[in-house]
Image (tube, rainbow, N blue to C red):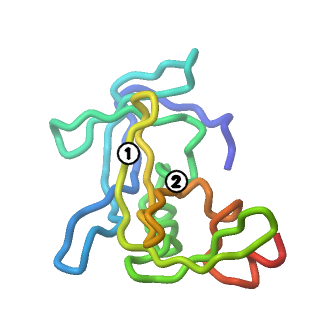
Amino acid sequence: MSNKRIYRVNQTIFLIDHLATKNGPKAILAKGKVLDINKKDKTFTVAVYGGTYRKYSLLDYGRLFFNTKKEAIEEIENLPKPLSTVYQKYDNQIFENTVLRVGSTFTNGVYDLVLFLKSGTLKSTKEIGHSIFLNELDAIKN
């Protein structure tokens, strides 16, 4: 993941979004067009689905947006699915938890993809590999 990528207005990018399905909300692929770039606060605005506008952080390349459809699909396939088990590490202790659904939130107006956990907590997908792990062995090693 490199923050030194060059972005342009009208550039097409591929995004990870979420959609409610009969089996619960899940991560999906979306296509968007860059409308403007704010280099000062390292954000950009994207038009998604024609009339929906969202602000993303340029630092989220490789997690929430990608240059190719293939990269985005690979990341979606690696995200935890609803009702899957994840492992939370807190103070060197590991806790098993269940993903209830995938959703979104906005922090300071910037879009983020989150996991709603059975414990009642909400975790950004940026925590995967840091405090949230997809298997117990990775949680033990880190």
Q: Label 1 vs label 2: CA separation?
A: 9 Å
Q: Earlier in the sequence, mark 1 or mark 2?
A: 1
Q: Which residue is mark 1?
A: 105
What count of labels does the image hold?
Answer: 2
Figure check: 71 above or below 99:
above
Residue 53, image quadrant = top left
Figure check: 78 above or below 28:
below
136 lies left or right of 126 = right
Picture coordinates of residue 49 (x, y %)? 19, 46
Secondary structure beneath label 2: strand
Q: Nearer the viewer, residue 139 or 51?
A: 139
Instruction: Say which mark, if any, is on residue 124.
Output: 2
50 lies left or right of 90 = left
Asked whether the beta carbons under mark 1 and mark 2 sit within 8 Å of each other, the answer is: yes
Instruction: Say which mark, if any, is on residue 9.
Output: none
Secondary structure beneath label 1: strand
Which amino acid, by three-letter code, is at mark 2?
A: Ser
Q: Nearer the viewer, residue 78 or 13?
A: 78
Residue 89, image quadrant = bottom right
Figure check: 135 above or below 89:
below
Figure check: 121 above or below 24:
above
On-image quarter of the C terminus: bottom right
Picture coordinates of residue 80 (x, y %)? 48, 74
Q: Residues within 10 Å of mark 2 (few under 14, many from 20)?
A: some
Q: Residue at x 26, y 42 (%)?
A: 48
Picture coordinates of residue 74 (x, y %)? 50, 70
Q: Residue at x 38, y 77 (%)?
A: 82
Which amino acid, by three-letter code, is at mark 1?
A: Thr
Q: Residue at x 39, y 36 (%)?
A: 11
Q: Farthest residue in the top direction? A: 40
